[in-house]
Amino acid sequence: MPSSALWAVDLFGRVCTLSTAAQHWELCRDAQLEFKRVSASAQCCWGIACDNRVYVRVDAGDVPIRRREEAYENQRWNPVGGFCETLLPSDRWPWSDVSGLQHRPLDGVALPSPHWEWESDWYVDENFGGEPTEKGGWTYAIDFPAAYTRDKKWNSCVRRRRWIRYRRYKSRDTWAQIPSQDDPKQLPDPFNDLSVGGWEITDEPVGHLSVWAVSLQGKVWYREDVSHPNPEGSSWSLVDTPGEVVQISCGPHDLLWATLWEGQALVREGISRNNPKGSSWSIVEPPTSENGIMHVSVGVSVLWAVTKDRKVWFRRGVNSHNPCGTSWIEMVGEMMMVDVGLNDQVWGISWADRALYFRQGVTQSELSGKTWKAIVASRECDRSHSGSSSSLLSAGCFFGDEVRGSGESCGPSDSEAERPGPDPERELQATSPASTPAELPWTNIDLKEPKRGPSHAAASFPEASDLSSLGLLPLGMEEPDGAECHPLWAWVSGGGCAVEAHTVLKWFTAQSGLSPSVQTLSLSITPAQTAAWRKQIFQQLTERTKRELENFRHYEQAVEQSVWVKTGALQWWCDWKPHRWVDVRVALERFTGQDGARDSILFVYYVVHEEKKYIHVFLNEVTALVPVLNEAKHSFALYTPERTRQRWPVRLAAATEQDMSDWLALLNLSCCESRRVHGRPSPQAIWSVTCKGDVFVSEPSPDLEAPERPLPCDQMFWRQMGGHLRVVEANSRGVVWGIGYDHTAWVYTGGYGGSSSQGLAGGPSGIYTQSDVKCVCIYENQRWNPVTGYTSRGLPTDRYMWSDATGLQECTKASTKPPSLQWTWVSDWFVDFSVPGGADQEGWQYASDFPASYHGYKTMKDFVRRRCWARKCKLVTSGPWLEVAPIALTDVSIIPEAPGAPGSEPSIALWAISDKGDVLCRLGVSELNPAGSSWLHVGTDQPFASVSIGACYQVWAVARDGSAFYRGSVSPSKPAGDCWYLIPSPPKQRLKQVSVGHTAVFALDENGNMWYRQGVTPSYPQGSGWEHVSNNVRRVSVGPLDQVWVIADKVQGSHGLSRGTVCHRTGVQPLEPKGLGWDYGIGVSGAALGGLSQWDLEARGAVPRGPREGPGGAVPSCLSVPCCQVPRGGHYGFFYGGYLCSAVTR
Amino acid sequence: MTDDKDVLRDVWFGRIPTCFTLYQDEITEREAEPYYLLLPRVSYLTLVTDKVKKHFQKVMRQEDISEIWFEYEGTPLKWHYPIGLLFDLLASSSALPWNITVHFKSFPEKDLLHCPSKDVIEAHFMSCVKEADALKHKSQVINEMQKKDHKQLWMGLQNDRFDQFWAINRKLMEYPAEENGFRYIPFRIYQTTTERPFIQKLFRPMAADGQLHTLGDLLKEVCPSAIAPEDGERKNQVMIHGIEPMLETPLQWLSEHLSYPDNFLHISIIPQPTD
């Protein structure tokens, strides 16, 4: 769960934020400004200050907001001077935009507002669609406008080149004023209310935001073009209203409500992706005619309102299709205002005491929630009092500088500002009870108080008396009750605050001291884990075991480990006729072998032709247990080397999910036991994820990379780790990162267990809640006919009118279920516009016939069209993962290192690609802090798709247009390098992924070809050309010793075809870096099992970074065994004097 | 980084090598060989000594056999104390294996409880677990469990099945997220030097100011004599499961990880060995 923040304004206009992970309000610093309104979204917060101007505060984050300006320089050839700027009179401008219609001289391009700055000067773009151009970046054509090529031909009469310059938004983490556009001819009409929303109308990366404002005269304004890359928007435009509006609320999706002076509510209709301003208003009458509506707030499918008598109302039946809803329900409580935030959660400010309340129990099924619960989090200023004072007290020092410092920086507390000239004694009584909740002897601390002085209070609040003009001060404020001196709130906004069912909030109890749960949320090892007492216990236990057992192992055990059997009823997929699920009895026999190791046999008893038979599996032969959840069955697949070769696992299904997870947990445990695998995976482990998002890890055995007869990789044992990921990346120092389907970045905590081993002993450690969101897509298909145009009536030979992507399966909105029972819907169906090939305004894609290639515009030849409907579903599980907030990623790469290699830097290089295509470099990653500290943005001229860093800091990347880049001069001291070098792609191929090992560079193109980069040398790390290695590859990962592992697309087994198979390149040698052939490992498709293709293991992770060889047997497990050492020098001795160490155990 | 779960495993699989010899005055038909066994620290003597009993009964006449009992250096061993506790308290400074004398006669009625069957051990064990949960959760967790869960705890202990036992026991080790530990820590402090069998008091895992209580805080409060004076030399060892945790160790962590299967922290205070 990422932490997000609630925004609020107190009566003195101070803006505070409260993080979902925190217990204390944090004052929004920098502000000489007082605010009367704030409205927050996840990335930014808009507000109206007391100077009646509008401000926006954009979160700094690690990725800059940058926009590209471009201009084209156009030239025409003439026989005298060659290419020159003299164009024909009919030609375009010598400096123009891309269309040529607009004059655009370089010095005429200005920054849109003072909040932007130029990143660099103009420069020529030498990249032409992934192909490097000649120096100068010119592209040639016969005439304007025409198709340009990078080669100059005999008939090239014109040429042009593109100039690029980036501007960067600089006013982040500060309130940036939006220039007001008062018409000087009219009276000023300052803004009175403001609301932001609409971010769900479009998907990322558009990042559209709807900003609505209301002026004092009751007019409604809409801010045009506000989006993530353009946080200020461009201009205000007036939206006509049928009356004078006093307040407005914009929901995250397409709801917009406003209140009229007369007490009715206005509802905006017709808001959509193409028309975010909406089209018309309709009026909703207040619940009672005598008390009009004073305040409204909308969410995705709720509306809350406050009437003039302070009563709170919930509007039933509000949603996109019926924005007006159906009827009012009165709720308990008297509120000043309410605000609906993310997930339709609700906050309110009570009428009686101006306290902030959170509506508890709001869920999708119960949108009105259960009760109001007061948020009693203390403010930062209070906390710094108690925090520093308690630490000082314990240090026996009452008069440190810290107290004074914090007292001053946080400003005076509420009660002081209340009085024009507070006398220190009263102040003492009023502030101290609230500021010292831990019953500390506060008198000592407050001796400092007079130093703050009344003049200070007056100075920082010069406008305190003006506040009453806002009409916000209720009566009775002059005599604050010292005992209940909580902050008095004026406004709250939850638009950026994500509270979900499993979020644990610590807002409701005032607490001092660090609670342990706060510590556990940070991944860098907690104090408890490094504490001396903990180390001592581990050490002493080890010593005790040694002392009490070492010389007595031959003694008999008091309790015999007898055979132990678990039996049960499952279903088993019968491999032969009748090819269906049959009921079976199963029994798991666990016994202790001769050497004390446990082993187990699984028996499956079935009846065929009234004859009792059984199959059995030794669990020490099992190589993987894969849960195969689908909407109907709780099943799992069991692989052995033989089954892997057949591409045909044993498949079992349980009646309930609980039953299945019990069996899986037990079988997993038995497998690990018989293979003596337990605890955290070693740093050399190979990680993989399946197409279902399950995470698997395999301990590489020393003979996996043996030059002679390596261990076949179908014998590798894969055990499941908890969690749900789309991409996983590990390095050989134990740092593991993952990326979820929703692009959330996760870092491995070092724990094990989680969802895959519920019910196992020991209790979870390092296991946290993890959630993931993905979209299920179905297609609406239509055919054109001359009479009625496009209709949902197809030809009899056509596909289903509602189908999956292939058209073979019928998928209607009603019948389509989430992928498995673990998933639940979290949105309604919506049209997906971001489909490959593009879509028109309504999301349609056109083609001449099914199935064909689709395009986003209609032509004369198009007779069919389709559009993609998507619906989000969410899974909540648990695993040893912690979120790395807040930037969403699509790819990540960690530097591979041979364990214990000399010169291992303390900091581990990690590069990533954000979901917007930004290239990022993580700083501060180490074994002790695998999450790192912050992102460093690496500028690019286009969005990127893949990145990989090699052991010698070679960074390679692939852009979304398929071109490859090499980053120059990356080193530990210069983690981001200096510039990109464009590397031409293999001819006619668009690259999609790159992976770098020690020295080898491999890339994949979109057609599944794998390429090896030739000619890479230390002095010329870019290499000279691409050499084809193999096709049929889906994903490649190169290890620290240039071991090559891939996910193969299709592999034919003796019984079935596997799609997505872990494969190991054999014969990779220093002089044969491309290797010789493939060894096929785990991976099976259910395609052969009756069309249930979306079921099975399809490992597609960034599999293996890092098998286990250390130079010269540095790995303890290799020490005791003879090593045959194969020198790896000779290729270029510059890189290493390392040896490939391989060993045979036992 | 080692996992806390490994502590549980190490605690569970703690074994004491033991040599059982028959008391010299017992009448035998032929000479009784000593019997060597690895005793689980977390279990109970009478629960794991069936083999011992069988071994010595073979050399005795049927009519001389009555209830078996054990003694170490003259002290009768209470079967209702966990084995690890008995060893730490009485024999931790002596050489291994632990020499236990086996008796079949003259049952010391005033020192030992009778143990006619394993049901008695089970009843004792379960009552300890219940008492511990009463302290930790006002009995809420144990009462919500089903009969078969109780049985699984006992069977797990009896058959030395770590997984089976901890699958249930971990529920007893949970506490609500909003609280920072158990209500009270179930502990018992044993000393050889006093007549009193053990000290047991109500003690919270956390001080009123939110500070975690440590092992040292506990001893200071309930057994100040166990801790050395500020300047003086330490005269006592504070031992749990054969190890001496630092006095800075948080009590809540100890309770979660170093409790015996009966959910109590059995802490031995023993004189510092002089050598």
Image (cartoon, rainbow, N blue to C red):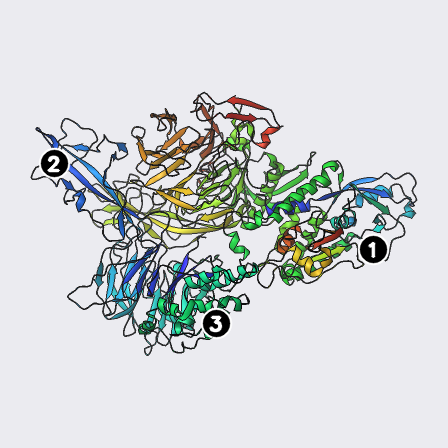
Q: Is residue A255 visible?
A: no
In the drawing, what numbered circle is on residue A428? Answer: 3
**Residue B112 circle label:** 1
**Quadrant in which residue A416 is drawn:** bottom left
Q: Nearer the viewer, mark 2 or mark 1?
A: 2
Q: Is residue A344 above or below residue A312?
A: above
Mark nearer the viewer, 3 or 1: 3
Check the picture and name the quadrant holding the C terminus of chain A: top right
Residue at the outermost left position: A89
Q: CA distance from mark 2 to mark 1?
A: 110 Å
| Residue B243 visible at all | yes
Q: Which chain letter goes with mark 2? A: A
Viewed as shown, does residue A122 lie left or right of A1101? Answer: left
The amino acid on which the numbered mark 3 sits, given as a three-letter code, is: Leu
Residue toward you, A823 or A571: A823
Both labels 2 and 1 in a single chain? no
**Residue sitting nearer the eye, A505 or B139:** A505
Q: Which residue is mark 2?
A: A85
